[in-house]
Image (cartoon, helix red, strand yellow):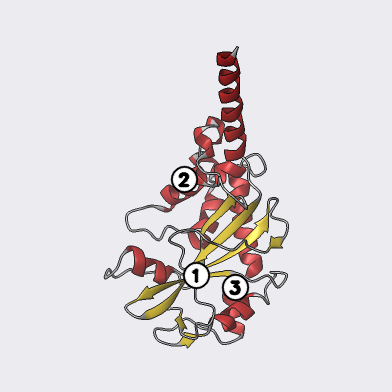
Amino acid sequence: MNSLFIVFHVILLASSVHLTNASYEYFKLALVWPTTFTRIRAPGRMMTNLPQHFTIHGLWPTNFSLPWPENCADEEPEYHFEEELMTATLQGVLNRDWPSLQPGKSNMEFWTDQWEKHGSCSAERFAQSKYFEEAVSITRKLDIDGELKKVGIIPHRTKTYSRIAIVNAIKKTNTRQFEPELLCFNDKGNVLLREIRMCFDADLDEIIPCPINKSAGVNLCKTKSNSIIIPV
């Protein structure tokens, strides 16, 4: 009797973990500044034709607490990435808005990685093509590059800006005045803007406040920083 109970309990736990890993509560959109990214991933290497606008790092379905869903296609094989779904039109849009910035990794390889690790966990709501289309749509609606430019925040080799100025400019976009996450990178004493992150509800209908980020390895820009560079 006890053995039967233990077996039943293990099966129940396994089922619970499966459901948890395949579900999510909200999305986090991560937009990366390409020049800073290459300083981190390819230091000392000259990169040509880098975009001079924020590009998509990822659109990540996640939860307010652990576990965070990842690699859901491993459990649901029908959610594996299908290259044939990436039409020429969609690829053309993604080549601009969601390119691979990693040396040696093609755009298609990057999109595959992002879908397999993250997008597949939202596949019950957003099929593969729809997932990528929605990521581009919400990014363009935010128009962060445009709003920064309106207030004179222009990428420059040495010019610095305060964190609060960058945040206030972004809050003028369609953010419902919610504050974005700003990630920075310290490069030989210079503080470079690395990423801007915003959170959305599970249906990508509305922006929501991002939970306080306590993830290891996430270097948030300091609250009172007055010397952030958006490098070219």
What amino acid is found at the position of numbered circle 3 in the picture? Ile
Asked which secondary structure carries label 1, the reply is: loop
Residue at left offset 61%, top offset 53%:
133
Q: Residue at x 61, y 49 (%)?
A: 131
Q: Residue furthest front?
A: 2
Mark 3 touching mark 2, by CB under 8 A?
Answer: no
SS assignment at label 2:
helix
Instruction: Report the Cα–Cα distance between label 3 and label 1.
Output: 18 Å
Callout 1 amino acid: Leu
Above or below 28: residue 68 = above
Observer-nearest residue: 168 or 105? 168
- Whether residues under marks 1 and 2 lie with C-beta atoms below 8 angstroms apart, the answer is no
Q: Position of residue 157 (x, y in %)?
A: 39, 83
Label pair 3/1, CB-CB below 8 angstroms: no
Within 10 angstroms of label 1, few (less than 14), some, or many (20 or more) residues? some
Three-letter amino acid code at disc 2?
Thr
N-terminal of the pair, mark 3 or mark 1, is 3
Could you classify mark 2 by the number of other residues whose Cα lies within 10 Å: few (under 14), some (14-19), or many (20 or more)?
Answer: some
Q: Residue at x 60, y 20 (%)?
A: 8
Q: Is residue 129 visible?
A: yes
Mark 3, Cα crowd under 10 Å, few <14 / some 14-19 / many 20+, is many
Q: Quadrant of residue 216?
A: bottom left
Compute the Cα span from label 3 to label 2. Answer: 26 Å
- Quick check: 38 above or below 79? below
Question: Farthest residue toward the top?
Answer: 1
Residue 180 lies, in percent from the top left, at 60, 69
Query: Mark 3 highlights which residue?
Result: 144
Q: What number is the disc on residue 220? A: 1
The numbered disc on residue 112 is: 2
